[in-house]
Image (tube, rainbow, N blue to C red):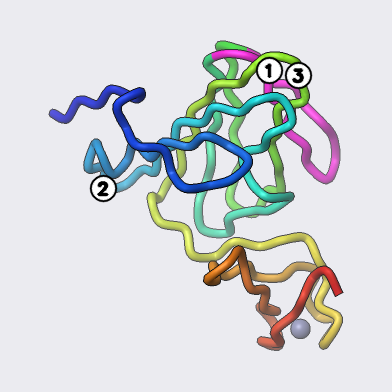
Amino acid sequence: MQKVTTEAVETADRPGATVRGLAAELGTTDVAINHYRLDPGEAFAGGMHTHMDQEEVFYVIEGRATFETPERETVVGAGEAVRFAPGDYQQGRNEGDEPVEALALGAPKESTDVRVPQPCPACGDSENLRAIPAEEGFAFECPECGADVDPGA
Ligand SMILES: [Zn+2]
């Protein structure tokens, strides 16, 4: 058994959210667990994305988080949870006036296939781009033709 006190865990160096990685502290093998504290205007992730190789569950402990999908927006309040299957696009934000405290669970633990909903301008065969962690932020690559793409271009 491993026990962890959230407040004692060092926060990740990540702008726009206070994130504590509980998985490393607990030594989990099959599930990713991150504790988030979002001030008003902050977000869980940089933008709309999906994990092709991981399902995600967000459990809201305090406050109200707004999750946007291509179809709709859903407010998830304290004591509520929301689940996204692999391939479901989503982004979660704190659009309220109070802080949001939430746990994000992902399984399997490692995700290496993250996509953003941007069509490939090079081949036109893919409706999304693969996001690859880079030195600063992400690099983007077409999963069909392999082109390096700047989604902002
Ligand atoms: Zn392409």
| Quarter-of-image position of residue 22 | top left
Q: Quadrant of the N terminus?
A: top left
Numbered label attached to residue 64: 1
User: Which amino acid does the dot numbered 2 rest on?
Assistant: Thr
Asked whether 104 falls inside the magenta stretch, the response is no
- Tell me if 127 is positioned left or right of 42 in this view: right
The nearer-to-camera label among 2 and 3 is: 3
Q: How packed is label 1: few (under 14 Cα within 10 Å), some, or many (20 or more)? A: many
Give whichever of discs 3 and 1 has the lower sequence position.
1
Numbered label attached to residue 47: none
Numbered label attached to residue 96: 3
User: Which secondary structure lies at badge 3?
Assistant: loop
Numbered label attached to residue 29: 2
- Which of the two residues, 117 or 37, is positioned nearer the viewer here? 37
| Quarter-of-image position of residue 101 | top right
Q: Is 128 situated above or below 120?
A: above
Residue 37: x and y in percent read 54, 27
Magenta stretch, main secondary structure, is: strand
The nearer-to-camera label among 1 and 2 is: 1
- Tell me if 113 is positioned left or right of 108 in this view: right
- Tell me if 62 is positioned left or right of 42 in this view: left
- Circles 3 and 1: CB atoms closer than 8 Å: yes
Q: CA distance from mark 2 to mark 3?
A: 34 Å
- Circles 1 and 2: CB atoms closer than 8 Å: no
Task: Please tell me which residue is depicted at 51% across the width and 58% down the height of the picture.
Answer: 53
Q: How packed is label 2: few (under 14 Cα within 10 Å), some, or many (20 or more)? A: few
**Ligand 1 contact, mark 2 (Cβ < 8 Å):** no
Magenta residues? 62-77
User: Which amino acid does the dot numbered 3 rest on?
Assistant: Gly
User: Which amino acid does the dot numbered 1 rest on?
Assistant: Arg
